């Protein structure tokens, strides 16, 4: 029932299936269209692919879309060991190798999902065509628990009410499957150190009312990326993919289309 409500306004719905990756049974939502650009959506800490359904259903009208629940999250298996950035990034890579052996046209992450994508892009540049980072974490100038907790509290008051039950269900599921350690790892990860090694064209997107991924931090990310650019969505909070799905889906679709332009392909690194 909750999933059906999340598709409100979206022209398509994604099916669900499971596959075994690195010994884990991994749930993935998907919609496949022959010859269409491929978009992969990566969730943030504590949550699952469920809160990505609003943009997934919009993109699925004209794209092949995949949205996994990483091990320890959502409907996937319990995670063995701590949910570190390195471990989750490699599990994401193994899942990609299983579901999309060719490079997806765009990898899209929100919040902590951006940290996983930056790690993947820095380690395996040949595996990444383009990145979209929605509300990327964690601001290196505000990396303490208290600073992030205060920002989260402020953001919660700005998010659409419908997001709260989605987050509550997913957070409780994640804590049962992986414990609280992922939040600690999110704060410890120095994502800024890997940004200069991300050679793929990267679009950073933030809502103008996002207190977690602030304007100065996102400007700093774009400046550190070799091929970065910024887009802002007026009035949107941190979960911009949930609060402004039409605007985000349009940005992702346009960015994916640029991957198919001959001039873009010619300029891309080998």
Image: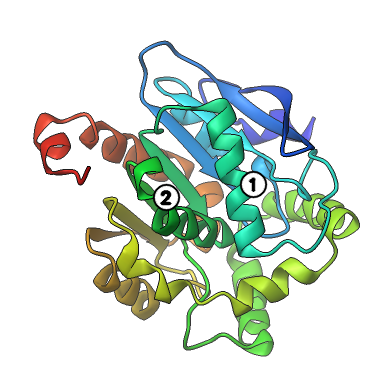
Identify the element where label 2 is drawn: loop
Identify the element where label 1 is drawn: helix
Q: Which mark is residue 126?
A: none
Is residue 114 placed above or below 74 in the rendered structure?
A: below
Looking at this rendering, what residue extends furthest in the top direction?
34
Q: How many marks?
A: 2
Is residue 107 placed above or below 218 in the rendered structure?
A: above
Q: Which mark is residue 124?
A: 2
Q: Is residue 158 left or right of residue 164?
A: left
Query: Where residue 37 sits: x, y (%)?
Result: 36, 25
Disc 2 and disc 1 in contact, CB within 8 angstroms: no
Instruction: Using the image as rendered, state which of residue 145 and residue 128 is in the foreground.
Output: 128
Instruction: Using the image as rendered, state which of residue 84 and residue 208 is in the foreground.
Output: 84
Category of crowding for the residue at label 1, using alpha-carbon neighbours closer than 10 angstroms: few (below 14), some (14–19), many (at least 20) = some
**Residue that appears at 22% across and 58% down:** 227
Query: Where residue 90 sits: x, y (%)?
Result: 60, 50
**Residue that appears at 33% across and 34% down:** 253
Quarter of the figure that contains the C terminus: top left
Q: Quadrant of residue 36?
A: top left
Q: Quadrant of residue 189?
A: bottom right
Category of crowding for the residue at label 2, using alpha-carbon neighbours closer than 10 angstroms: few (below 14), some (14–19), many (at least 20) = few
Q: Which mark is residue 91?
A: 1
Query: Where residue 193 sits: x, y (%)?
Result: 41, 76
CA distance separating discs 2 and 1: 13 Å
Query: Where residue 150 sits: x, y (%)?
Result: 65, 83
Residue 192 at least partly seen: yes
Q: Is residue 216 left or right of residue 119?
A: left
**Residue that appears at 15% across and 39% down:** 264
């Amino acid at each position: 029932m909750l999933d059906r409500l999340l598709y409100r306004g979206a022209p398509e719905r994604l099916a669900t299936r499971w596959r075994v990756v690195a010994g884990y049974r991994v749930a993935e939502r998907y919609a496949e269209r022959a010859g269409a650009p491929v978009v992969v959506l990566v969730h943030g800490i504590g949550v699952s692919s469920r809160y990505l359904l609003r943009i997934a259903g919009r993109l699925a009208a004209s794209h092949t879309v995949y949205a996994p629940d990483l091990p320890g999250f959502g409907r996937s298996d319990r995670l063995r060991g701590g949910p570190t950035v390195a471990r989750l990034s490699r599990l994401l890579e193994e899942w990609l190798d299983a579901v999309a052996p060719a490079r997806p046209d765009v990898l899209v992450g929100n919040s902590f999902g951006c940290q996983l994508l930056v790690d993947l892009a820095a380690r395996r540049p040949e595996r990444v065509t383009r990145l979209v980072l929605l509300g990327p974490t964690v601001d290196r100038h505000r990396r303490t628990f208290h600073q992030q907790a205060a920002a989260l509290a402020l953001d919660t008051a700005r998010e659409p009410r419908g997001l709260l039950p989605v987050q509550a269900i997913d957070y409780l599921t994640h804590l049962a499957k992986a414990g609280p350690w992922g939040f600690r790892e999110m704060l410890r990860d120095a994502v800024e150190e890997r940004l200069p090694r991300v050679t793929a064209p990267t679009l950073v997107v933030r809502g103008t009312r996002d207190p977690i991924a602030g304007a100065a931090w996102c400007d700093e990310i774009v400046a550190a990326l070799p091929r970065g650019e910024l887009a802002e969505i007026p009035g949107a909070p941190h979960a911009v993919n949930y609060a402004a799905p039409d605007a985000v889906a349009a940005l992702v679709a346009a960015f994916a289309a640029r991957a198919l332009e001959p001039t873009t392909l010619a300029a891309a690194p080998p």
